[in-house]
Amino acid sequence: MRVFEIKDDWSFDSIVASERPEPNPGPYDVVIEMKMASLNARDLIVPLRGYGRGTGELPLIPISDGAGVVVAAGDQVSRVAVGDRVCPMFFQKWIAGAPSPAAFSSSLGGPLDGVMAERVCLSDEGVVRLPGTLSDAEAATLPCAGLTAWSAVCTLGNVRPGERVLVQGTGGVALFALAFAKAHGAHVTVISSSGEKLERVRELGADATINYRETPDWARASRTITSDRGGYDLIVELGGADTLPLSLKAIRPGGTIATIGVLSGVQTTASLGLIVTRQVRIQGVTVGHREGFEAMLAAIVQHGIQPVLGKTFAFDDFKASLDHFKAGGHYGKTLVAF
Ligand SMILES: NC(=O)c1ccc[n+]([C@@H]2O[C@H](COP(=O)([O-])OP(=O)(O)OC[C@H]3O[C@@H](n4cnc5c(N)ncnc54)[C@H](OP(=O)(O)O)[C@@H]3O)[C@@H](O)[C@H]2O)c1
């Protein structure tokens, strides 16, 4: 079968089209014929071995997120059946509750082989059946980007109606966070570098917007938005080094900063005083578990949430899809059709 793999060394030039033997499922395995894949920021980090030893070994099939149909199942498989449309879970071994080291070592697209293969063989524990209301493209956006936002806003953020939420940027995780926070009745502020993108998120339901290029001190600018609460109840932190110091100023006493992304760097100087004296909860978020994924699917169906889709590339143009995503400026999830 045809695959893409990072082959000889850790670099983008080393990503090549290749062949692998057809998978042979064990008694608890399913074979998924992939229909769609979608890209995430981590897919630009993996080819450079950016997660160190945790990135995996070469050759490695990249990309964590996708959707497909079950075409073969072992005789002990009970969770899904041949013909079911499914998503592979980002963490194959995180079913529910607190994460374990084994769960965190079970991510697709590094260290485990990912979904850029015509067929993928996984344990039936590591897949989730899809509702008919979601297209393959919409479903393919969920395993990393969707679930991370769900964990931040719902599982860990526990957002309540009327709460003030701030979302950083208009990338994949950010647009899901906006949708999930709105579905829970929150008042959502989105910050972006682009006036045009801010117009689009207002159409998606954002209640307030700030252009962080024109207004770099968005923490100060947001005071009027949160004056009745003394700051945001939840901040979906995606910027990292440059944004955390501002998030600490914009959060309300007792609020939660869901720390997810490091788009502007991983090392920062932040005021411990603000964290202590305002009793801020810094909540790391690492994608999420299968139970969260199933809850997210139920909410998506119930609220009619539609993932925001961007450009779609053909399987053979996978490297062009990475170039497009790397260039930035995208709006909506970048997809690869098989
Ligand atoms: N912890 C986890 O489990 C987890 C899971 C998924 C992703 N992540 C991380 O989350 C981040 C976002 O991932 P993604 O896949 O959603 O990326 P993405 O789709 O590429 O989103 C990029 C967007 O983020 C915004 N952005 C960039 N720098 C920013 C800054 N300094 N301040 C505010 N916004 C900024 C920009 O929005 P505008 O163009 O609107 O300005 C940009 O378009 C990455 O760091 C990724 O590694 C972590």
Image (cartoon, rainbow, N blue to C red):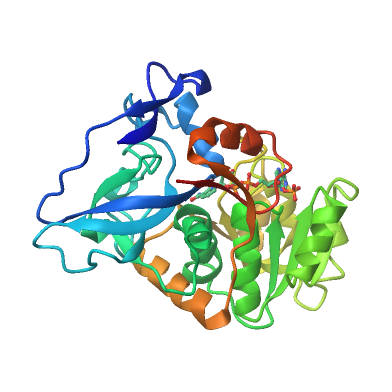
Q: Is residue 283 visible?
A: yes
Location of the N terminus (image quadrant): top left
Whether 185 is drawn above or below 134: the answer is below
Q: What residue is drawn where x is 22% and y is 68%?
A: 79
Whether 43 is drawn above or below 201: the answer is above
Q: Nearer the viewer, residue 290 or 254?
A: 290
Among the 4 quarters of the image, the one containing residue 313: top right
Q: What residue is drawn where x is 37% and y is 61%?
A: 289
Q: Nearer the viewer, residue 273 or 111?
A: 111
Q: Is residue 92 visible?
A: no
Whether 216 is drawn above or below 317: the answer is below
Residue extending farthest to the right is: 214
* In this picture, residue 62 sits left or right of residue 22: right
Residue 96 on image: x %, y %: 31, 65
Residue 82 on image: x %, y %: 23, 63
* In this picture, residue 73 sits left or right of residue 215: left
Whether 216 is drawn above or below 98: the answer is above
Among the 4 quarters of the image, the one containing residue 53: top left
Count of picture labels: 0
Q: Nearer the viewer, residue 267 or 71?
A: 71
Residue 234 on image: x %, y %: 64, 66
Q: What residue is drawn where x is 31% and y is 26%?
A: 57
Q: What residue is drawn where x is 52% and y is 60%?
A: 146
Residue 260 on image: x %, y %: 55, 51
Residue extending farthest to the top is: 8
